[in-house]
Amino acid sequence: MANDYIVKDISLAAYGRKELDIAETEMPGLMALRAEYGESKPLAGSRIVGSLHMTIQTAVLIETLVALGADVRWASCNIFSTQDHAAAAIAESGTPVFAIKGQSLEEHWDYLDKSFMFPEGPNLILDDGGDATLYILLGARAEAGEDVIAVPTSEEEVAIKAQIKKRMEATPGWFTKMRDQIKGVSEETTTGVHRLYDLVKQGQLPFPAINVNDSVTKSKFDNKYGCKESLVDGIRRATDTMMAGKVAVVCGYGDVGKGSAASLAGAGARVKVTEADPICALQAAMDGFEVVLLEDVLATADIFITTTGNKDVIRIEHMREMKDMAIVGNIGHFDNEIQVAALKNHKWTNIKEQVDMIEMPSGNRLILLSEGRLLNLGNATGHPSFVMSASFTNQVLAQIELWENNGQYKNDVYILPKHLDEKVARLHLDRIGVKLTQLSSEQAAYIGVKPEGPFKPEHYRY
Ligand code: NAI
């Protein structure tokens, strides 16, 4: 179909292509998969719906899936994260993509719906945060007569439920048909993985899922070292504020929190951490960060960043206590970490795209980044290519696994085996000049591994 895409400006394709060419040089894992599987095309016959930030790095992922034989249609998983030149380059290459930086919530769900429109329907989902999976499963439950779309409770829900209703009216039975022909999903992030395990608990996961997030070469790299680079990048591009000397509070000290705290500390900020988990709190303290209650630092901190994947972490009563011109942002997956909805009746002054100044009743002003959506992708360009190569190499391996060995999986959530995790790491060593020590067979036997790996037992935590 001609023009089977929605992008901001197709003439940005040439610029996107130049950045794609550079990104390829920083994504050795994906390029190695192209070399290994480009001829055999293990994804031939697959029709993949992708719902993941439409960035330059994702464009390299998409072109790798296509090089391996897949048919692909793509939408972004966030309204602010698209890089319009990346989307344009993908559209021009002939892969349908529906993504514009700054699209509305209604468009978000409409574009996701469009990404399912293969003539024969899709058979695999590649998800980030679980929206593509949620759309199909919620729609199928509605078609089964369950009362799941009747009463939306948030702006987000209004949009998805309106889109489900529209699709149900236009194509009765569509969601059930989609659900039944999907062979599996690979999920990128912590929040989406939580959703999948919940579905398993409720006996509602209708196809196998691969948890890409918990490959070591994903969460211990992208979530951590990725945020270490992209958090401060986002704050700087948004505000140009002097980071050194400022007091920054990081809520949550999981993988994203660890990278975020390191990011701010590296820029010279004095970093404090809040945590609910005693193990992560102890880690933060022993990494040298003061672990505090949010309530105790509201009036003194300059920058507040949520990294929890939880809801209502920074609440309206917190924001009322913050000092004038405090910067508030989120790097977790959804915007409900900060009670942005409670700010809607305040005076907003838009400074530039994805940066707003909000006047509080006291007269103090807050700078809110990306309306509370993940600021490293809203205010900057997300993680650098190199770390995304590790994440996306896992994604491609997961898609191959779901496609080639589908019958071996039940409707459960799986993690890729350790030898593949080690393979992903191995593919990234040369690019940065890492030399691996080769174990002798005696040494390997002494520590109970094979000389070629895997080098750690399943319970090892890295
Ligand atoms: P995680 O589970 O490792 O860490 C979250 C931490 O937050 C946990 O240690 C938990 O105890 C803590 N926490 C929960 N509620 C809290 C509260 N009210 N106050 C203080 N601490 C609290 O999860 P991970 O992998 O760090 O991911 C966090 C979020 O970031 C998820 O939504 C994930 O999807 C997202 N993410 C975003 C990325 C980005 O580029 N912006 C990259 C990767 C993940």
Image (tube, rainbow, N blue to C red):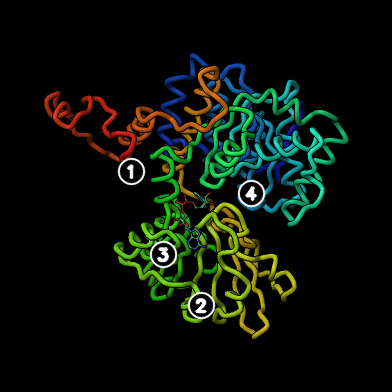
User: SS of the residue at dot 2?
Assistant: loop
Kind of residue at badge 3? Leu
Residue 418 x/y as whole percent: 36, 30
Kind of residue at badge 2? Leu
Q: Which residue is tagged 4?
A: 78
- For the point 57% across and 43% down, the residue is 192
Measured Cα–Cα span from mark 4 to mark 1: 31 Å
Residue found farthest to the top: 40
User: SS of the residue at dot 4?
Assistant: loop
Q: Which residue is tagged 3?
A: 264
* Labelled disc at residue 149: none
Upstream in the sequence, badge 3 or badge 2?
A: 3
Residue found farthest to the bottom: 362
Upstream in the sequence, badge 4 or badge 1?
A: 4
* Labelled disc at residue 461: 1
- For the point 39% across and 72% down, the residue is 244
Classify mark 1: residues with Cα within 10 Å, few (<14), some (14-19) or many (20+). few
Residue 138 x/y as whole percent: 72, 39
User: SS of the residue at dot 3?
Assistant: helix
Residue 15 in view of the camera: no
Q: Which residue is tagged 2?
A: 298
Measured Cα–Cα span from mark 4 to mark 2: 29 Å
Measured Cα–Cα span from mark 1 to mark 3: 25 Å
